[in-house]
Image (spheres, coloured by chain):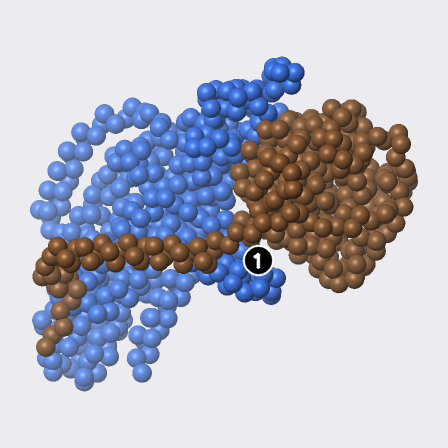
Amino acid sequence: MQKLVLTRRFSQIFFLSLFIYILWFTKNPAAFFKIDPLVSTFSLFSIMMLTLSLIIGRFFCGWICPLGAIIDVCSVRAKNRDLGFRQIKYYVLGAIVVFAFLGIQIKWIFDPLVITARFISLNFIPSFTLVLDKAFIFLITSLDFYTPLYDFYRLLKTSVLGVKMYYFPHSLITLSFFALVCSLALITKRFWCRIICPLGAMYSIVAKFSILERRVDKCVNCMKCKVSCRMSAIKEDMSYRKSECILCLDCIYDCPVKGVKFTWHVKPIKTRAKDSVSRKDFLFLIASSLLLLGFKGREKEAKKKLIRPPGVTGEREFLDKCVRCGNCMRLCPTNGLQPAIFESGLAGIWAPHLVPEIGYCEYNCNLCGNSCPTGAIPKLSLAQKKEQKLGLADINKDICIPWSQNKECIVCEEHCPISTKAIKTYDEIFDGRRIKKPYVDASLCIGCGICQNKCPTRPFRAIKVLP
Amino acid sequence: MKKESIFERLPKRKITRKGFVKLCGIGAGSLILNNSLFKFAFGKDETSTGRIVKKVKALHDLVVVKGEDPYLATVKAIEGIGGMEQFVKKNSVVLIKPNIGWDRSPEYAANTNPDVVGALVDMCFRSGAKRVNIFDNTCNESKRCYENSGLEKIAKEKGANVYFPDDWNIVKAKFNYKSPMEGWPIYRDALECDTFINAPILKHHGLSGLTIAMKNLMGVCSGNRGLMHSDIGTKLAHLTDFIKPDLNVIDAYRVLTRNGPTGGDLADVKDMKTIIAGVDPVLCDAYAAKLMGREPLSISSIDQGVRHNLGSADISRADILTITA
């Protein structure tokens, strides 16, 4: 019985399920990011995680990381070889830190929790619910309608399925990115964790000084542990790279003579790992980062091109804080928050913006701000949120039904959530009938986009919210 | 022999003209098959000519109850009209259609008072209803509307089925006369029920002046409902003729007098503490309009309702029972 390995697998499955559960069913998915020192560096939990790693080692990667668990599954049949290039992840981490000092945030590309959260929120949950929903619809329509099955389906709609099927038109790109990260594991086991992951690098640095250590008592030089080690952490002479070991504990059971043990080591041996970053490399990195001064011209405010979530003021500040985890898009009750592609430039990829034609900003809701792990969308009380201006509605009189066809409509006025109505009308007599023609009161409009969402004209809406 | 992986095999494969055509053929074929499979599974198109109802002869045309407690007032109103037993037979399925259109709490008077609906549910079950369904096609996000209106909680406690309507479970409307509502998708549950109880709230509306019983029926429609707004009077009259609600209970306990139908300012809400019950939706609307100080025939849906012979708007000739609870 490989008790320890089973425990590890159980822990991986548990944390992966917990991660999915938090994203799927709770209203505060930012909770899991509190243990991520890369996203919330100074939170109590991430400091605790780092301290724990200082004692035990890089256990996060092997036991908790949801991306690590998925990568492990992907690489079950993959070959295992030592490719080297381990230092790349330190460069990635270094680059993130250096960029952060300059106020540019690039961790959204590399953070494993963010990558997983984005995949689960934008791809996994929508496609899973869609398939389940269609299966139920097929069963219900092909069987008799009013059966207990239908009641069960309605019950599911309030919990698992959600009242609204979430849909993200550009989610194929997030899926491809996630698939790329996972398929790297086909080259060698845990490719991402060995070579690229900056969070892994962070834990590696700490784990170098950990007290728990792998000890080989007797050895028959069969090399079984070296060959199967998923991080290729074990060297020829049976010593190992402490910073690379993720405590998967496979080697304990690989050993034919049961000579491998993990024991507490009070006085750590001073070792100098060969393939970490050398002083020269580090100085080179710092020197080359001076090139970043070229970004200085970025200081002036970027032009706002998209409707950002409520409370966001500066476009640049927003993009530098947002890690693109997708929490806000997952929680937005109308599905209106969507990931951007290149609409706001390369720097704004996957950052949330409101697409009123898919969904509007619900007046009585402040979920996006409350779920943001980095504060890119500020936490606002409901009363504060209701005063946030997202944009300004504008009526196209060439399409608008009352303006162009002299028929009744004013659906926009009906739905406007402002109690005094940001859309006013004035009467015009046409053909003996009184037609109410809408116009926007710019001082009242908050740009929530419900008017654009409900406007009945197709294919173009007669009222549009401009950022 | 070692098995080659797909990454090693794929580049070795040669593409011939025949092979390419074959591949395209298979692709197109599977697409067509897929499409027809989808149509078979989900594309059932059904039409209906509306609910068939036997008009109940009530004791009075209209019962108006004024009272402090909305629950008690509703009970009194139904008793005054002749009891729920007339409308709800044993083991029947009842649909109560309140107005849950907006994400507002009850005191803003944008949604039907939950106590009114609670009283109706109780009375339906007491008359032997097998099942009481409650739903509305909301304007704001459904779940928030159901929760914040307070309606879901009370109705569920009393044993009703409160659920979200499914856009795939619809029937296309069919009319014997020329109608702008022809082919409009209507939720199946609204038609396949034994008793349809219409439970609107009386409030101001920007376009139609007031939204009452006939306008409340828009909540059983699916599709692009904004289009119903042009020529709304005729469309609502045809819809009312299509649904033929058995009983209308208008909640005028709290009334939104301005900036409807959303409201959002307590200064616009007026306490009228009135419940109106009646069989004829047009007469109910006419009385409610009068209560708000509007000329009934100036509301286009009431005007069209009279023209389509759905009921009368002549309050002076109606048999009205007024109760103070």
Image check: B225 left or right of B151?
A: left
Spot occupied by residue B131 in the image (x, y as percentages of width and height): 71, 59
Please tell me whether residue A460 is drawn above or below residue B183 in the rendered image.
above
Residue at the image point whose x is 54% and y is 56% from the top: A157
Please name the color used to draw chain A.
Answer: blue
Q: Is residue A353 toward the left or the right of residue B228 in the image?
A: left
In terms of secondary structure, where does tag 1 sit?
helix
Query: Where is the C terminus of chain B found, in terms of image quarters?
Result: top right
Q: In the rendering, at what x and y percent does residue A340 appear? A: 34, 38
Residue appearing at x 43%, y 33% in the figure: A459
Q: Is residue B117 visible?
A: no
Question: Residue A318 location in percent, x, y?
Answer: 36, 34
Location of residue A106 with respect to B305 vertically, above or below = below
- Snapshot quadrant of residue A249: bottom left
In the image, what residue occupies the spot 81% across and 28% down?
B290
Quadrant for the N terminus of chain B, please. Answer: bottom left
Q: Nearer the viewer, residue B103 or B242?
A: B242
Comparing A382 with B50, the one in front is B50
The residue nearer to you, when weighing A346 against B64, is B64
Q: Residue furthest bottom?
A: A257
Vertical order, B11 against A318 (above or below): below
Direction from residue B7 to residue B305 in the image, left or right: right
Q: Is residue B79 above or below residue B3?
A: above
Quickly name the residue at label 1: A154
**Residue B51 visible in this rendered orientation of the protein:** yes
Q: Residue at x 11, y 74 (%)?
A: B2
- In-image side of A39 versus B49 (left or right): left
Q: Quick one: A322 or B46, which is closer to the camera?
A: B46
- The tint chain B carries is brown
